[in-house]
Amino acid sequence: MVEINNLELLKFSQRAIHGKVPEHIGAEFPKEKYTCFGEFRPDGEALWAVSVYDFKRDHDCILDVALNIGGLFSKSLFEKIARVVSNYVFVQSRLLRMTVFIRESNKRSYRIVKKWGFREEGFIKLGFGPPTPEDMYVFGMTRDECKWI
């Protein structure tokens, strides 16, 4: 079952993407900055989490997509993630676009966001900073391009 704004899922997504949990994420979920969707595996570990943040003037937001799925990834799970997040961003929040940054080394996420319908919009040298500086791809999707709503 998809959970919304679970602090542990937010921390999982931040550790997976940025290598640590930012200091501004404390003991309570920071609703003023983030919305987070995700699910837990039967063993209690996070299965997946998508953090939505950095809302810009009712126009754009950034997604952090973190997966801990191993052999559990399936077409139905992928479609659930795409529908839940796309519906929140484009229908509920009425934003015009969403943006994702992918590490150059993360080929799996590159394929997943392309399948979701994101378009590659650019490449930033050393766009990801410490603890592991790395080049990154920039992907975007507009409401009109989204097939999941």
Image (cartoon, rainbow, N blue to C red):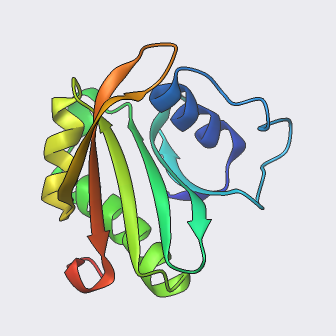
Residue 97 visible in image: yes
Q: Quadrant of residue 53?
A: bottom right
Task: Farthest residue to the top: give it.
Answer: 131
- Rendered location of residue 134, percent (x, y): 33, 21
Question: What count of labels does the image hold?
Answer: 0
Between 143 and 130, the one lying in front of the other is 130
User: Which residue corresponds to the image point at 50% horizontal and 86% vertical from the top-left?
Assistant: 94
Answer left or right for 81 relative to 15: left
User: Which residue corresponds to the image point at 78% horizontal and 49% vertical from the top-left?
Assistant: 29
Answer left or right for 8 relative to 126: right
- Rendered location of residue 57, percent (x, y): 60, 77
Between 87 and 98, the one lying in front of the other is 98
Q: Is residue 122 above or below residue 27?
A: below
Q: Is residue 72 above or below residue 43?
A: below
Q: Quadrant location of the C terminus?
A: bottom left
- Rendered location of residue 45, percent (x, y): 52, 28
